[in-house]
Image (cartoon, rainbow, N blue to C red):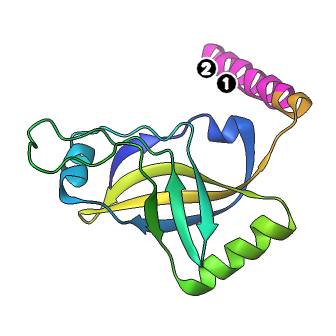
Amino acid sequence: MKEIAVNRKANFEYFIEETYECGIALAGQEVKSLRAGHLTISDNYAVIRNGEVFLINANIPCYEKTSAFKQDEKRSRKLLLHKSEIARLERKVQDKSFTLIPLKAYFKDGIVKVLLGLAKGKHLYEKKQSLKEKDISRETSRDIKNFK
């Protein structure tokens, strides 16, 4: 499994409730660009329209060696999920004010997959608390390492 991009801000800004692995509909030159490691998913989100899930704001730059057919780099791309999963996600997004956030993009058996997270936003005081917990765990692991 080769990782293309990871959304590192997602765990800091959101509580991740569930994750879904989904495919993504791409053009051929976009896949070549992803194989080169060009993808930005830090400020992306997914929306559900007409029973389909779309990834908004994903920046996949054009492949350098392509000259004939160039597509928009920030166009919305369709995510491939089962109909039952889409219905479950749609209910949760509408009823409980969840957000769909891409957490990771990777190749699995030669196919591009996106790990989509069902997330709820954190408040400022919760972000500060998570930073404190992270610092405490880092200090304790450092103390344990120095103790040995």
- For residue 120: magenta? no
Residue of label 2: 145
Q: What's under tag 1, amino acid-wise?
A: Ser
Residue at 36% x, 46% y: name it: 3
Q: Is residue 91 left or right of residue 63?
A: right
Assign a secondary structure to mark 1: helix
Q: Which mark is residue 141?
A: 1
Q: Relative to residue 61, is residue 28 depicted above or below?
A: below
* Name of the residue lying farthest toward the right: 125
Q: Nearer the viewer, residue 112 or 62?
A: 62
Residue at 18% x, 51% y: name it: 29
Q: Which mark is residue 59?
A: none
Q: What's under tag 2, amino acid-wise?
A: Lys
* Distance from Cα at disc 1 to Cα at disc 2: 6 Å
Label 2 Cα crowd, 10 Å radius (few <14 / some 14-19 / many 20+):
few
Residue 33 position within the rendered picture, expressed as x and y whole percent measured from the top left: 23, 44
* Name of the residue lying farthest toward the bottom: 84
Residue at 63% x, 57% y: name it: 117
Q: Are marks 1 and 2 in contact (CB under 8 Å)?
A: yes
Q: Relative to residue 8, is residue 15 depicted above or below?
A: below
Residue 77 position within the rendered picture, expressed as x and y whole percent measured from the top left: 43, 59
Q: Which residues are magenta?
A: 128-148
Residue at 52% x, 82% y: name it: 82
Q: Is residue 36 left or right of residue 1?
A: left
Residue 106 position within the rendered picture, expressed as x and y whole percent measured from the top left: 37, 53
